Image (tube, rainbow, N blue to C red):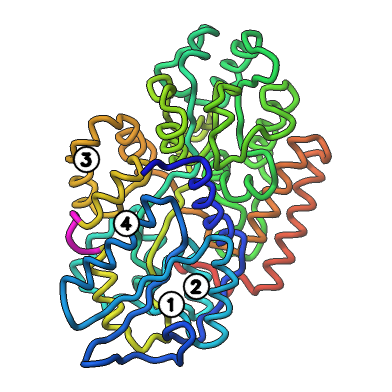
Amino acid sequence: MRITTRTRRTAIAALGALTVGSMLAACGSGTPGESAGGGGENGVTTVQFWHRTFTPVENEWYADIVKKFNASQDKIKVVDTEVPADAWDQKMKAAQAAGKAPDVYTSSANLHDLVNAGSVHELDSIVSKDAIGEILDIASSISEIDGKHYAYPLLLEPQTVLFWNTDMLDAAGVDSSKAPETWDDLLAACAKIQPTLGDGQYCISPAQDAVTMAWSTVGQQYNFAGHLALTDDWSAPDIDNKGYRALMEQYKVLWDKGYMPKQPLAAYVAGEDFGQQKVAFKVSGSWMMSEIGSDYADLLGKTGVGRFPSSSDADGRTATTMGNFTWVVDAKTKNADAAGKFLEWAIAGDPDNLVPFFVNTQFTKVPVRQSVQDAVAASEEAAKAPWSKVIVDEIAPDAIAGSTYPWDVNLAVGTAMESVMKGSATVDDAIKTANAAIQTVIDRDGLPDKAPKN
């Protein structure tokens, strides 16, 4: 089944909602509409599993993996519930408040938030040591805290990837064989490209609103500053420095020179502006390649994929934020052992269970186990997806996980970036406002007491 623009947006809507939504503590577990608790008939334990509605091929995989697990044994019955993306937060909140949260559910939430809220069950006692040991180091920050595991990752997904139209670059005399290495290279390319464009065309379509900048530029913040928006002990803001100032000023150059549109031609997470050849460069997540392959197949051979440009003095630091998607077990489930067995069988067991997921999502996501990466790379379809190697081998390995501090800190940074870019505030004023907003969050939430210990 094709992954279309519409279905991809449905998928991303779920991620966005969780990114900006509040995390709620789980209050219990059980079948929706019934009392919390485990057990079942004839010695069969029933496990409730919830996942969001994503693309058709993802939804089909979820349904299929549950059917296969149920057919593989007769002691546990998993009930699969697909929840519409726009209803997820409300449905989960209601279930948790009523003590009827699912035993297992999918999550892209901040793991520290989930653990601090007491929402998730530790996995070390219900998932085998061998299965947990397969999680690659690049996924450790989204699966464990202080040596204890609370989530099992299904995938990683670079959120900041540069795509380019090779024909448009060639027409401007710009090297289309590789991505611009630095912002200086990118701006030089835009200077050449701009005179070759027609009405309604632009050099680049980046993030350009506060909310999107808040989550998508975390890797860029690290790239420019060498750290994120808080001090290591979470006691103070850390954005009044050369790195953050330079990042904000780069976006202002894109805006002031007309290299980017003043009004978005498409959402950051969508690719129709690129597909309709309105932009030479597009910044989005790795998922956009599946949209190009499905909706704009004629552009597949004309699309370059590479790292996002770096600060000229980044010393090799990545500019890419790594998104993620994990499975977690409810903290108060009465079916913990059964839930752990299902989770382990489905996503921590036989790699062949996972190959269809990564193949059918067109190699735009990164497995978190080496055995799965190897199995996916060995599939016949992989040879027809050269972008997979770029994403897995060149972009993903050093990408950084999203920030672990509260969303409001990210939003303060995103708001500062947008205001500087659009000229509604000077860099000094934007940073002053952001510092005050971040300090409010630090004091309100007692962040120094919640800072990661390692």
Rounded to the nearest angstrom, the CA distance separating label 2 from label 3 is 33 Å
Secondary structure type for disc 1: loop
The disc label shown at residue 114, or none = 2
Q: Pick the residue in front: 367 or 59.
A: 59
The image shows residue 237, relative to residue 44, as above or below, that is: above
228 above or below 261? Answer: below
- Is residue 358 rendered magenta in the image? no
As for residue 351 lying within the magenta part, the answer is yes
* Neighbourhood count class around disc 2 (C-alpha, 10 Å): few under 14, some 14–19, many 20 upward: many
First to last magenta residue range? 348-352
* Label annotation for residue 61: 4
Identify the amino acid type marked 1: Val
Q: Specify which label sits upstream in the sequence, 4 or 3.
A: 4
Q: Main secondary structure of the magenta part?
A: loop
Q: CA distance from mark 4 to mark 3?
A: 19 Å
Residue type indicated by callout 3: Ala
Q: Residue at x 17, y 80 (%)?
A: 74
Instruction: Please count the marks in the image.
Output: 4
Residue at 76% in and 38% down = 420
First in sequence: mark 4 vs mark 1: 4
Considering only order in the chain, which callout, 1 or 2, is on the residue closer to the N terminus?
Answer: 2
Which residue is most to the front?
A: 1
Q: Pointer 3: what residue?
A: 377
Q: Identify the residue under disc 1.
A: 120
Task: Residue 428: name its quadrant.
Answer: top right
Foreground label between 2 and 3: 3
Q: Amino acid at mark 4?
A: Trp
Q: Is residue 90 left or right of residue 128?
A: right
Mark 4 → mark 1, Cα distance in angstroms: 24 Å
Q: Earlier in the sequence, mark 2 or mark 3?
A: 2
Name which quarter of the figure residue 188 lies in: top right
Quick one: label 1, few (<14), some, or many (20+) residues within 10 Å? many
